[in-house]
Image (cartoon, rainbow, N blue to C red):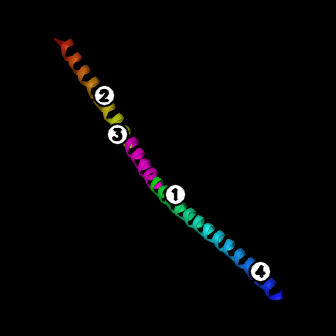
Amino acid sequence: MALESLKKQMEEMDTKIMKLTNELEKKTKLIKELEENYQKINEQLQSEKGSHASLEENKIYLMEVKKETESNYKQISDAATTLLEILKSKTDKI
């Protein structure tokens, strides 16, 4: 009887060990999936940071182009005004 009781306890322990092993495998798999997801998200974040930096560089470049274009426009406008004044003064003399 003691032997059967011991055998029953061993079977119960085996069952518990199997359940715990199964749980451990599931949790290990879940941890691996979470690590893979983290890695993907981290890679995406790094990519987006690179894109953001590139966009900032483009923004700065475009602001410089805008400033230069405005300056060129003012110079052209001033030159046109000067030419008109010269033409007007020449035609007034005629």
Decide: few, some or many residues near mark 3? Use Cα within 10 Å; few <14, some 14-19, many ≥20.
few
Cα–Cα span, label 4 and label 2: 104 Å
Under tag 3, what secondary structure?
helix
The amino acid beneath tag 3 is Glu
The residue carrying mark 3 is 68
Under tag 2, what secondary structure?
helix
From the image, state whether disc 3 or disc 1 is nearer to you: 1
Given contact means CB atoms under 8 Å apart, are the residues at marks 3 and 1 in contact? no
Write the start and end of the magenta stretch as one range: 49-63
Q: Tell me the tag on residue 41.
A: 1
The amino acid beneath tag 1 is Ile
The amino acid beneath tag 4 is Lys
The residue carrying mark 2 is 78
Q: Tell me residue 40's x, y (percent).
A: 49, 59
Outermost residue to the bottom:
3
From the image, state whether disc 2 or disc 1 is nearer to you: 1
Residue at image location 38% in from the left, 42% down from the top: 62
The answer to which quarter of the image holds residue 74 is top left
The residue carrying mark 4 is 8
Name the N-terminal-most of marks 3 and 2.
Answer: 3
Decide: few, some or many residues near mark 2? Use Cα within 10 Å; few <14, some 14-19, many ≥20.
few
Cα–Cα span, label 3 and label 2: 15 Å
Given contact means CB atoms under 8 Å apart, are the residues at marks 4 and 1 in contact? no
